[in-house]
């Protein structure tokens, strides 16, 4: 028994374009890849473009889409030839002549002998033979029918070049159908002429579409849209014509006069082409393509293939994004879907949305000199991603939760009433107890309240909340000195150095906001630098490791916070080879000059007198650097860490966290 109103539903993959239920584009992966390129010294603008070109593992980039577009274009050129219509006409002509000869052989009159001579002396040229037979009085009904098919085929092919689907739609067309086509062409030419004179009106377009809209499945909404559609097909038809051999062009010109048994069709199409060329002169009217292969095409198919090729060439240029003023919005998504399928359109649309979202959501801003750079918002997200990677290294596994790790002091075991601005964790037991006691004390019927709480639960008021009390920590003045000499780039340490600085900056700015971080970059000379500038800093052919100058700048920061615990972290891959001379100019000499070493050691002694915790992160296997750092560490009570380049970030962040554990008050 079938239940009334029961409906069976079927579910399948959505194929109507972009998934309407798809989540918004995820910017994290894009930002990470762009950030990696920026840290490697690529400009943000170029990094964004390179990301769009590469795409992701789940989404084709512009290069992949362009490669597929170019491959499809080559396939169209390779696998097609333009002999289809000529071959079909020749077959119809040969069949008509054969049937006529059979009939004439059966007829015994003198006129039949004359016609045999006429048939036997036909020119070898298909077009000339068709033209000579235009006035021939056929005796065989089958021969006459085959010959009429030639004229009908030519008319349908010529129309199919310019109006989609005409070849099939007009198969077996009556004289009345042909008259309607002729009337449509006359009205169309009047509309095009009025448009080119600037005299067309919306009413004229509407009247035309009401009368002849069936011939335009694209359903244009204005004269401009109608012209765009027609001009592309007409230009493709002209390209098709240009692609023929001179002999084929001559034959086509002769054959075209026989289309539908009258030159009127060709005259109207020529008038239409002229008006369209005037309206859209920028289309490739004078160019052709060389076809090869064994898949024969007719006139309409050839024009359609050339239109596809023209569209593919335009897509290739749009996807290259190499021309002046190129934008993702230039890509014709509809054309891309026509040529490569719906998923290609989804990929291109997603890339455009990524670019738009990165710009509109404030991930880029401009410096005073007009250069694009990663914004503070982008730096926060990039820092969070890099810090998570480093935290995973520190934990030894990927499941460590770091959001609250190290953010507070050790619990004292006591609790206190919550105050506005407190971020300490709630003491749940004390909070619930306070709520129960308050509710009972404020109720005139305690027993009833207890019964009600057992049914409905406890209602907590802000007055009930108590938080866990923790030990306070002292403020720290942290200075991170990073080597930016060219050897850091040459040895592959440039990007790891930047990732380390970004991770430490993120940790301090989000978890330990009472600490003050200062960044100093040092090569031949040193300078204070903010994290965004360091992220986009490009390597330079600069010799010199001026740790002396960097330490002078570090002491300025330490003096600004006299009550803070000083922490100095030095990342370098070379011995000090430069210092500031009395004039303030950098002095460079290799191997390290004794004066450079002496001045650098003096400033390290000054830093030590501040009570600073100094840690050197030695990169590489330079024995001279190892000996220098070991001696200095013993001299000032510092530490030397020699991580591999991939472990630099974890080493620096881990050392900073250890220094915090030693600063409880």
Image (spheres, helix red, strand yellow):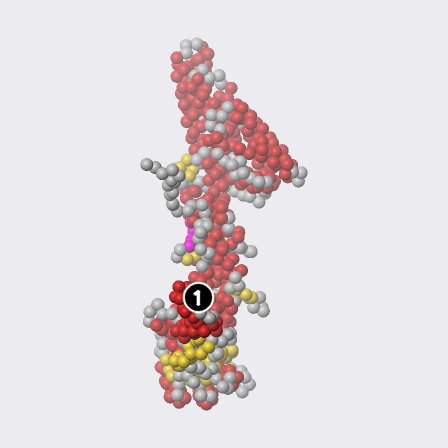
> Considering the numbered disc 1 on the image, is that residue within a helix, a strand or a loop?
helix
Name the image quarter holding the C terminus: bottom left
Residue 38, position in %: x, y? 47, 66
In-front residue for pair 654/323:
654
Pick whichever, 337 or 428, lies toward us. 428
Would residue 64 be counted in the magenta stretch? yes
Q: Position of residue 370 (x, y in %)?
A: 57, 66
Query: Is 543 located above or below residue 635 in the figure?
Result: above
The quarter of the image holding the N terminus is: top left
**Residue, x 36% and y 76% (percent of image)?**
643
| In the depicted structure, whether residue 543 falls above or below residue 172 | below
- Compared with 432, 231 (above or below) is above
* Left or right of residue 359, residue 397 in this image: left
As for residue 9 lying within the magenta part, the answer is no
The prevailing secondary structure element of the residues shown in magenta is: helix
Spot occupied by residue 86 in the image (x, y as percentages of width and height):
45, 31
Above or below, 176 relative to 63: above
Left or right of 183: which side holds 509?
left
Number of residues whose C-alpha sits closer than 10 Å to that of mark 1, classed few (under 14), some (14–19) or many (20 or more): some
Residue 23, visible in the rendered structure: yes
Q: Residue at x 64, y 36 (%)?
A: 203
> Bounds of the magenta span?
59-68
């Amino acid at each position: 028994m079938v239940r009334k109103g029961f409906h069976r539903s079927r579910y399948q993959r959505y194929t109507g374009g972009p998934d309407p239920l798809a989540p918004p584009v995820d910017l994290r992966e894009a930002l990470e890849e762009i950030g990696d390129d920026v840290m490697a010294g690529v400009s943000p603008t170029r990094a964004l473009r390179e990301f769009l070109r590469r795409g992701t593992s789940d989404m084709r980039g512009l290069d992949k889409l362009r490669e597929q577009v170019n491959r499809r274009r080559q396939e169209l050129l390779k696998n097609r030839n333009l002999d289809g219509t000529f071959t079909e006409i020749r077959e119809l002509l040969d069949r008509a002549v054969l049937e006529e000869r059979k009939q004439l052989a059966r007829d015994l009159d003198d006129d039949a002998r004359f016609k045999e001579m006429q048939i036997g002396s036909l020119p070898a040229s298909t077009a000339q033979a068709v033209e000579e037979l235009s006035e021939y009085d056929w005796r065989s009904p089958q021969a006459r029918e085959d010959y009429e098919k030639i004229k009908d085929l030519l008319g349908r092919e010529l129309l199919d070049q310019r109006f989609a689907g005409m070849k099939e739609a007009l198969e077996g067309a009556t004289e009345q159908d042909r008259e309607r086509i002729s009337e449509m062409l006359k009205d169309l030419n009047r509309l095009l002429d009025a448009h080119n004179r600037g005299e067309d009106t919306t009413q004229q377009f509407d009247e035309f579409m009401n009368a002849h809209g069936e011939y335009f499945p694209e359903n244009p909404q204005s004269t401009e849209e109608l012209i765009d559609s027609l001009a592309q097909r007409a230009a493709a038809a002209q390209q098709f014509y240009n692609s023929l051999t001179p002999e084929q062009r001559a034959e086509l010109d002769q054959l075209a006069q026989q289309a539908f048994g009258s030159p009127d069709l060709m005259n109207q199409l020529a008038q239409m082409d002229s008006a369209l060329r005037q309206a859209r002169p920028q289309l490739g009217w004078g160019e052709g393509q060389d076809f090869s292969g064994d898949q024969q095409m007719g006139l309409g198919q050839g024009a359609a293939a050339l239109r596809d090729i023209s569209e593919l060439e335009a897509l290739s240029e749009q996807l290259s994004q190499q021309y002046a003023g190129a934008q993702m919005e230039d890509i014709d998504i509809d054309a891309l879907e026509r040529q490569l399928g719906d998923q290609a359109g989804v990929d291109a649309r997603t890339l455009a949305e990524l670019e738009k979202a990165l710009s509109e959501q404030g991930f880029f801003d401009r410096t005073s000199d007009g250069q694009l750079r990663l914004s503070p918002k982008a730096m926060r997200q990039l820092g969070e991603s890099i810090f998570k990677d480093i935290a995973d290294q520190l934990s030894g596994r990927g499941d460590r939760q770091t959001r609250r790790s190290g953010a507070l002091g050790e619990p004292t075991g006591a609790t206190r009433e919550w105050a506005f601005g407190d971020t300490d964790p709630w003491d749940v037991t004390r909070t619930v107890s306070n709520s129960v006691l308050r509710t009972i004390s404020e109720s005139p019927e305690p027993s009833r309240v207890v019964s009600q709480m057992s049914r409905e639960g406890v209602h907590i008021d802000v007055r009930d909340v108590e938080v866990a009390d923790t030990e306070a920590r002292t403020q720290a003045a942290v200075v991170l000195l990073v080597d930016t000499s060219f050897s850091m780039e040459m040895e592959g340490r440039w990007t790891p150095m930047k990732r380390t600085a970004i991770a430490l900056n993120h940790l301090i700015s989000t978890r330990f906001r009472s600490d003050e971080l200062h960044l100093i970059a040092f090569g031949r000379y040193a300078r204070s630098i903010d994290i965004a500038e360091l992220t986009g800093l490009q390597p330079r052919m600069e010799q010199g490791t001026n740790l002396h100058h960097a330490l002078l700048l570090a002491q300025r920061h330490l003096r600004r916070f006299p009550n803070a615990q000083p922490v100095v972290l030095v990342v370098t891959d070379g011995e000090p080879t430069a210092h500031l001379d009395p004039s303030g100019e950098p002095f460079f000499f290799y191997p390290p000059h004794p004066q450079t070493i002496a001045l650098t050691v003096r400033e390290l002694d000054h830093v030590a007198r501040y009570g600073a915790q100094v840690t050197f992160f030695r990169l590489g296997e330079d024995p001279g650097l190892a000996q220098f750092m070991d001696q200095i560490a013993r001299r000032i009570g510092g530490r030397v860490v020699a991580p591999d380049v991939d472990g630099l970030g974890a080493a620096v962040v881990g050392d900073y966290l250890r220094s915090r554990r030693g600063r409880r008050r």
